Image (cartoon, rainbow, N blue to C red):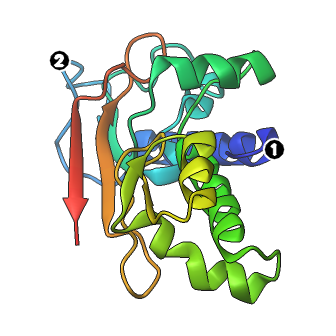
Amino acid sequence: MRTGTIARSIAVAGAALLAVSACGGGSDNNSSGSSGSSGEKQTNVYGTDGNMGNALGEAVAPGLITGMKGTTPLTKVNDDFKTKLKAIDPGLIDFNYSGESYDAVVISALAAEQAKSTAGVDIAANINSVTQTGIKCTTFAECVGHIKAGEDIDYDGVTGELSFSDAGEPSVGSYGSLEFGPDNKLKDPPADFIIVKA
């Protein structure tokens, strides 16, 4: 999850991008709406990754980014997980990357349990196997129980299926197509959610 400082920096950068885009220039005649003689122009801005977050909406005037669309890496996390995060930080405005961060910690801990070691090289050697073939499990406690019983596990986390490739990279990913509403917040649920498998 991003820190508040990083989120604010992203928001300021996004706001600057919007301001520059809105200024327009040159002598073409593509003015927006019916304000033909005003010289005002409309520039469509398509966001990606860091500027497609609610932090951007907090940094700009109300309604300025209504209808702005973009894509960002996105995973579906359930309401129970969101509630737990809000209990830790009630001011949380975005959940993006929270599920990935959580699953990364759980995978590392499961790999250490399976390796019976806290040495980095031993943990690394077990990362793939705890997400591939084996008994499906979805919580740390459940998975550890299987490991202690000498069973192979396949952890599917709060972000869903993980299944790391032999190179140690996730073989399943997802992203969302998002849009800002009139309240400067991202519409929920996303306009579209796409899962990509390697």
Q: Nearer the viewer, mark 1 or mark 2?
A: 1
Which quadrant does the C terminus fall into? Answer: bottom left
Instruction: Depth check: give the residue in front, 187 or 87.
Output: 87
- Disc 2 marks a residue whose amino acid type is Ser
- Residue that sits furthest to the front in the current view: 149
Q: Is residue 25 visible?
A: yes
Please report whichever mark, 1 or 2, sits nearer to the chain's N-terminal start.
1
Residue with the mark numbered 1:
5
Q: Residue 149: image x %, image y %? A: 57, 57
Eyeballing the image, is 29 above or below 151?
above
Q: Residue 9: image x %, image y %? A: 72, 47
Residue with the mark numbered 2:
34
Q: Looking at the rendering, which quadrant does residue 154 occupy? A: bottom left
Q: Looking at the rendering, which quadrant does residue 77 occupy? A: top left
SS category of the residue bearing label 1: helix
Eyeballing the image, is 184 above or below 102?
above
